[in-house]
Image: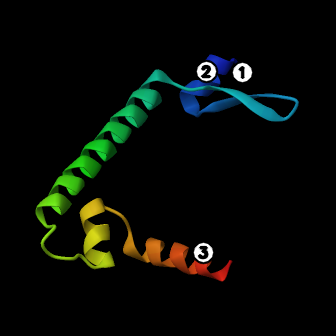
Amino acid sequence: MRVTSEAEAHRVVLTSHGRPVAVVDSAKRLDEDLRLVREAGRSIVEAAADLALARSRKLDLAELCQKLGVNVEKVRARAAQLQLR
């Protein structure tokens, strides 16, 4: 199968001696990824602005995660993993 045809279905990682050196991907998937990154950046800026307005009061972890669109349980699990090290 040709690399271009393969890339339409999924990302193709090109390797040299077992190490990744390049990725071939569809333009549509790259555009979608870029759109998602831009949306995430916009959301972070909006959340930061909201937080700046709320400086007078402290937020707990759940409120902060909600404003940032982050799963609070994943944050807690990751923190527990880091404490075990």
Q: Cα distance, mark 2 to mark 3?
A: 42 Å
**Residue kind at label 3, given as amino acid type:** Leu
Q: Residue at x 28, y 51 (%)?
A: 44
Secondary structure beneath dot 2 equals helix
Give the mark, 2 or 3, whose residue is nearer the N terminus.
2
Quadrant including the C terminus: bottom right
Q: Which residue is mark 2?
A: 5
Which residue corresponds to mark 3? 82
Secondary structure state at the residue bearing disc 1:
loop
Q: Nearer the viewer, mark 1 or mark 3?
A: 3
The number of discs equals 3
Is 41 placed left or right of 14 in the picture? left
Q: Depth check: 76 or 36 in front? A: 76
Residue 47: percent from left, percent from top: 22, 56
**Residue corresponding to mark 1:** 1
Estimate the spatial distance between the alpha carbons at disc 1 and disc 3, rounded to whole Å: 44 Å
Q: Nearer the viewer, mark 2 or mark 3?
A: 3
Residue drawn where x is 13% and y is 67% of the image: 54
Q: Marks 1 and 2: CB-CB under 8 Å?
A: yes
Q: What residue is drawn where x is 19% and y is 50%?
A: 46
Q: CA distance from mark 1 to mark 2?
A: 7 Å
Residue 63 or residue 17, whichever sits in front: 63
Estimate the x, y position of residue 55 in percent, counting from the top left. 16, 67
Q: Looking at the image, which residue sits at the far right?
A: 17
Q: Is residue 34 left or right of residue 56?
A: right
Which numbered disc, 1 or 3, marks the residue that appears first in the sequence? 1
Q: Residues within 10 Å of mark 1 (few under 14, many from 20)?
A: few
Q: Residue 33, relative to residue 24: is it above or below?
A: below
Q: Judge by depth and name the residue closer to the eye, 39 or 32.
A: 39
For the N terminus, give its image quadrant: top right
What residue occupies the far front of the structure in this picture? 56
